[in-house]
């Protein structure tokens, strides 16, 4: 009777012809480089660099030697020694825009923004000049007898626009500026948030107003929006000044005629 023979040992598994059999024992994670324990930090901005055009809070003050020009400064003392921007105003017979927000403390520096009034309308056209960017918009009354003024502005490079409204206010955001009892607030129509407050001065004639950007609006809305806010409120301030002067002039003429 024959013997039972043990089964033949299994043949070694063959790798495909196009694959090196040595890869089968290779650690698949061997070539992955671990991230450094201390990543190289991003370069810091240049000294003195700021992503903002204006301080978070600042005032408008009479410019030295001018009847109607203004400067932007952090305080009354700084308005004389360290103004940040010059604002020139020009009458209706001038070829210049009614209001020019200059790009430096000098009145002969290029414009950062301008505002133009309409002869028979409360609309204020304004333009913004930041580098090669040129944007125009208009500040218009929301309704014929309203004290609310609105402007619409693109807020990103995709052309998305938002509308903002200046409204008279006596609220906490205005009182927090420690100015007079009258002021305005800028409302973002999209969500109803108050993003800027402006107040008249409590006393004196040198200071003409104070404003403050609220919350993190500047980080989100950008430099063009910052400049639009400032030139729009400057337009309202100058328009109001001219209206008051016109009313006083008319009253003076009427008083003289009655004598």
Image (cartoon, grey):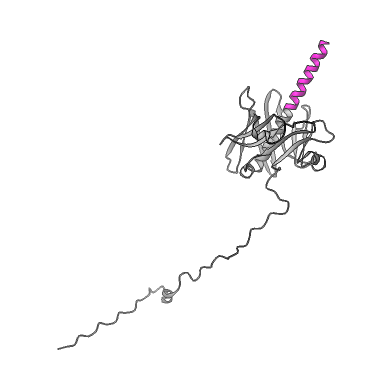
Residue 258, x across and y down, in percent: 81, 10
Q: Is residue 242 magenta?
A: yes
- 198 w.r.t. 17: above or below: above
184 sits left or right of 30 in the view: right
Q: Is residue 13 above or below residue 85?
A: below
Tell me what residue is drawn at x 77 percent, y 23 percent: 245
193 or 113, which lies in front? Answer: 193
Residue 106 lies left or right of residue 177; in this view the side is right
- In this view, the residue farthest toward the right is 65
Across and down, in percent, residue 172 comes to 64, 34
The number of numbered discs placed on residues in the rendered structure image is 0
Place residue 157 in its image quadrant: top right
| Residue lying farthest to the top in this orientation | 258
- Of 57 and 95, nearer the camera is 57
Residue 112 lies in quadrant: top right
Point 43% across, 74% down: residue: 23
Question: Which residue range is magenta in the image?
Answer: 240-259
**Main secondary-structure element of the magenta-colored stretch:** helix
Q: Nearer the viewer, residue 91 or 68?
A: 68
The structure residue drawn at horizontal position 80% and vertical position 43%, both measured from the top left corner, is 82
Question: Is residue 132 one of those drawn in magenta?
Answer: no
Q: Which of the image's four quarters has the C terminus?
A: top right
Quarter assignment of residue 21: bottom left
Location of residue 229 with respect to 243 vertically, above or below: below
């Amino acid at each position: 009777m024959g013997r039972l023979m043990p089964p033949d040992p299994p043949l070694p598994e063959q790798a495909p012809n196009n694959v090196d059999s040595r890869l089968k024992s290779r650690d698949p994670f061997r070539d992955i480089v671990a991230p450094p324990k201390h990543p190289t930090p991003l370069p810091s901005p240049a000294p003195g660099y700021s992503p903002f055009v204006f301080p978070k809070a600042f005032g408008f003050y009479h410019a030295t030697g001018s009847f109607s020009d203004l400067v932007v400064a952090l305080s009354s003392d700084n308005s004389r020694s360290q103004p940040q921007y010059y604002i020139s105003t020009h009458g209706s017979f001038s070829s210049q825009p009614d209001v020019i927000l200059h790009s430096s403390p000098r009145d002969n520096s290029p414009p950062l923004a301008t505002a133009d009034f309409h002869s028979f309308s409360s609309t204020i056209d304004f333009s913004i000049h930041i580098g090669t960017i040129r944007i125009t918009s208009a500040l218009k009354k929301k309704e014929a007898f309203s004290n609310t003024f609105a402007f619409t502005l693109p807020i990103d490079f995709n052309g998305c626009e938002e509308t903002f409204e200046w409204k008279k206010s006596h609220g906490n955001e205005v009182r927090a500026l420690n100015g007079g009892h009258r002021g305005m607030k800028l409302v973002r129509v999209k969500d109803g948030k108050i993003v800027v407050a402006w107040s008249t001065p409590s006393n004196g004639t040198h200071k003409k107003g104070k404003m403050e950007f609220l919350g993190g609006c500047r980080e989100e809305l950008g430099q063009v929006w910052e400049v639009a806010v400032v030139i729009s409120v400057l337009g309202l301030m100058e328009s109001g000044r001219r209206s008051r002067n016109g009313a006083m002039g008319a009253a003076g003429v009427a008083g003289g005629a009655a004598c």
